[in-house]
Image (tube, rainbow, N blue to C red):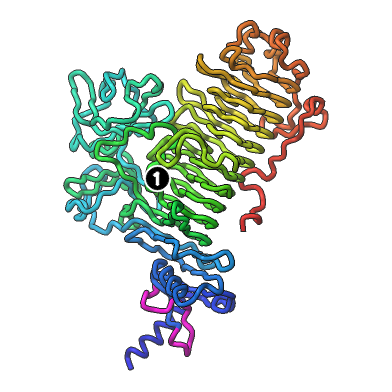
């Protein structure tokens, strides 16, 4: 009798907790439900009075996945399946894995989605519930037994959903090494290093030109002021000639825990030290247990795909990153792809990640290996690596669109917003900002996941209608859009505020390392160190109908190493407007780097500075505007104010009387750039 009453009360409670909408249980297709108050021994259905078979929701998504698998085992899918997930935090003890047998079909897809109006959280962490005690100077300490027992190590800490910083010096900016000694040692300036407690756990992050190393201290010679590191046997050495920055900072010392929000974990004693910004008793403190939150695991070699699964409306949070035993020498190049990504879709096709939030993870947020997939409408921020990696292994495009990616690269500074690591695809209508390196990056150089040369060049790559700003915030040799590939269309992008930190400029658009067969059209680039870089054996590239504003050093840089040359570079019907008379119009490394055609453009710099000497640098005999034209360039180009409506407020719409129209320039519409456009096409 008691059990019957208890069950009736529980059903009523669940009915209150899960408001019933008429169309949920009765909608076409099968529907399961998941709630933190659920039970995996139940049916996964909404509770209904007088129907004891529908006792309540499942407690985990994994159980819902298995229930669908059982449903499919009894008979093939005959209708779509939806799993609705209620609000609350679901702490994962293992990554959520989907295999080919968990797939839907084109006619009957499977969807895992948030309950309407709610935002469930999938967390790879666990709460720190151990009691805090006062250590000293507003620093608290607690003992985490699993750490002391060598069963748990974490490198990130989150309080009330916000990342806390591991103790760091300097608190702002960087130190500069005095001079390199050899590949694993340098001389430091007085006071930068001390013989701290647990010295061998101290990490030193050294910034090279386009990437970084995370080195472990081996020893310190205080008399000579020399620090020597564990040799990781790879990567760029400290004294590498391309490491023009060689600025660094230091992490993970107890003695330098001096700002609110900083923390330090002593992995030997299991003690967690934390200087809170508010009462820790009133806060939720979470440290990650998992390095990966969700994985779709197909096998492209066996033609076994995970397919027709949609995941939408969920928050993924609290995943860690791993430091190798001897440190992280660097990624070898740009991109900082460190496995595993928090969400990895491997061997997938026709799957969708839509309107999710990914934050507080240690590596890249999303990695997609497959074809015909859609990554749309997601927000990604506060991640250790970059935003999205995409690789497409067939002629069907992956579409990466309407994502908001910002404040990435917190651990791996050369990670980028969107990394096209192989194949083509469509990268459109994304908003990317506040990145330590580049906004969008693509490569044709070999990596572990990719041979030399893009496997699906015939697919082509379209990068369009993206808004990108505040890039190159830590490293150099980067851009808003940085491409090193072929068969590309780069159009209608809005890029601004990309400045370098040292020798190598920050570019709005960086056409690097044998970029070829590419059109750059209808882009607006403003406030950068240099607007465009055409670099290293580029060929068959046309830059047409773009607006380039206020390159700090140079507007367009045509450059090659001494043994290489460009081929068939055209610069037509563009507007260049810059206000600093000390800046140059073009920088060209000799005749081998000059464009084959430059004409029908509009150039303007107040004070007639385009007519001064050295407005064009590096091309012998053509340093002035007059000599440039005598060499056959820009014969029909007009030097005049293009008449933008409001330069002071970055409104680069042309007045009806603009001379740009006389040379065939066509207005650029930015009304649908980034997240401004309607997103109806992604649903």
Figure quadrant of residue 216:
top left
Above or below: residue 628 compared with residue 650:
above
Q: Residues within 10 Å of mark 1 (few under 14, many from 20)?
A: many
Q: Which residues are magenta?
A: 37-53
* Residue 657 image point, x, y percent: 82, 28
Q: Nearer the viewer, residue 570 or 173?
A: 570
Above or below: residue 27 compared with residue 199:
below
Magenta stretch, main secondary structure, is loop
User: Which residue corresponds to mark 1?
Assistant: 363
Figure quadrant of residue 485:
top right
- Residue in the picture at 52% in, 69% down: 82
Question: Residue placed farthest to the top in the image?
Answer: 621
- Residue in the picture at 45% in, 82% down: 54
Q: Nearer the viewer, residue 351 or 441?
A: 351
Residue 169 seen in the figure: no
Above or below: residue 640 compared with residue 362:
above
Q: Is residue 357 left or right of residue 261?
A: right
- Residue in the picture at 75% in, 35% down: 667
* Residue 432 image point, x, y percent: 54, 41
Disc 1 is placed on an element classified as loop
* Residue 305 image point, x, y percent: 47, 57
């Amino acid at each position: 009798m008691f059990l019957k009453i208890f069950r009736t009360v529980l059903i009523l409670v669940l009915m209150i907790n899960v408001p019933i909408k008429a169309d949920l249980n009765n909608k076409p297709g099968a529907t399961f439900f998941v709630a933190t108050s659920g039970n995996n021994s139940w049916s996964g259905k909404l509770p209904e009075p007088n129907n004891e078979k529908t006792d309540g929701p499942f407690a985990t998504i994994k159980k819902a996945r298995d229930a669908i698998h059982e449903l499919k085992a009894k008979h093939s899918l005959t209708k779509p399946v939806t799993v609705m997930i209620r609000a609350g935090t679901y702490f994962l003890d293992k990554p959520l894995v989907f295999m080919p047998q968990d797939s839907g079909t084109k006619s009957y897809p499977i969807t895992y989605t948030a309950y309407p109006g709610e935002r469930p959280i999938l967390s790879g962490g666990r709460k720190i519930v151990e009691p805090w005690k006062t250590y000293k100077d507003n620093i608290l300490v607690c003992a985490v037994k699993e750490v002391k027992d060598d069963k748990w190590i974490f490198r990130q800490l989150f309080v009330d959903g916000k990342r806390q910083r591991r103790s760091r010096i300097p608190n702002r900016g960087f130190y500069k090494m005095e001079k390199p000694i050899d590949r694993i040692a340098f001389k430091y300036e007085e006071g930068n290093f001390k013989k701290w407690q647990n010295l061998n756990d101290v990490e030193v992050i050294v910034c090279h030109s386009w990437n970084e190393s995370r080195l472990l201290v081996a020893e310190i010679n205080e008399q000579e002021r020399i620090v020597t590191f564990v040799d990781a046997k790879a990567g760029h050495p400290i004294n590498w000639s391309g490491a023009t920055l060689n600025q660094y900072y230091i992490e993970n010392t107890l003695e330098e825990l001096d700002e609110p929000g900083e923390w330090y974990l002593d992995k030997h004693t299991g003690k967690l030290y934390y200087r809170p910004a508010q009462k820790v008793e009133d806060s939720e403190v979470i440290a990650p247990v998992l390095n990966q939150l969700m994985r779709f695991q197909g096998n492209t070699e066996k033609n076994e795909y995970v397919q027709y699964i949609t995941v939408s409306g969920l928050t993924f949070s609290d995943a860690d990153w791993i430091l190798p035993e001897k440190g992280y020498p660097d990624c070898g190049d740009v991109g900082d792809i460190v496995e595993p990504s928090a969400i990895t879709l491997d061997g997938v096709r026709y799957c969708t990640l839509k309107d999710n939030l990914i934050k507080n993870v240690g590596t890249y947020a999303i990695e997609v290996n497959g074809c015909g997939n859609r990554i749309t409408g997601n927000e990604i921020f506060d991640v250790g690596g970059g935003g999205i990696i995409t690789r497409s292994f067939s002629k069907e495009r992956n579409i990466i669109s309407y994502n908001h990616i910002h404040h990435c690269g917190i651990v791996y500074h050369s990670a980028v917003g969107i990394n096209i690591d192989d194949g083509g695809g469509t990268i459109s209508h994304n908003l990317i900002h506040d990145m330590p390196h580049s906004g969008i990056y693509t490569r044709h150089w070999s990596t572990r996941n990719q041979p030399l040369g893009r496997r699906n060049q015939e697919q082509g790559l379209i990068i369009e209608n993206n808004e990108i700003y505040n890039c190159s915030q830590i490293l150099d040799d980067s851009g808003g859009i940085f491409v090193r590939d072929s068969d590309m269309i780069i159009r209608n992008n809005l890029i601004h505020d990309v400045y370098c930190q040292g020798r190598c400029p920050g570019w709005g658009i960086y056409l690097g390392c044998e970029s070829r067969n590419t059109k750059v059209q209808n882009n607006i680039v403003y406030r950068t160190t240099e607007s465009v870089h055409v670099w290293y054996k580029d060929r068959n590239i046309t830059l047409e109908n773009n607006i380039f504003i206020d390159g700090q050093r140079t507007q367009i840089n045509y450059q090659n190493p001494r043994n290489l040359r460009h081929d068939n570079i055209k610069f037509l019907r563009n507007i260049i407007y810059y206000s600093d008379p000390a800046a140059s119009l073009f920088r060209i490394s000799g005749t081998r780097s000059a464009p084959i055609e430059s004409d029908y453009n509009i150039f303007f710099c107040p004070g007639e500075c385009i007519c001064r000497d050295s407005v064009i640098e590096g091309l012998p005999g053509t340093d002035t505007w007059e000599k440039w034209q005598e060499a056959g360039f820009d014969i029909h180009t007009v030097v005049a104010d293009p008449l933008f409506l409001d330069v002071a407020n970055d409104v680069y719409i042309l007045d009806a009387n603009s001379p740009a129209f006389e040379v065939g320039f066509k207005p650029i519409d930015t009304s649908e750039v980034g997240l401004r456009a309607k997103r109806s096409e992604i649903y």
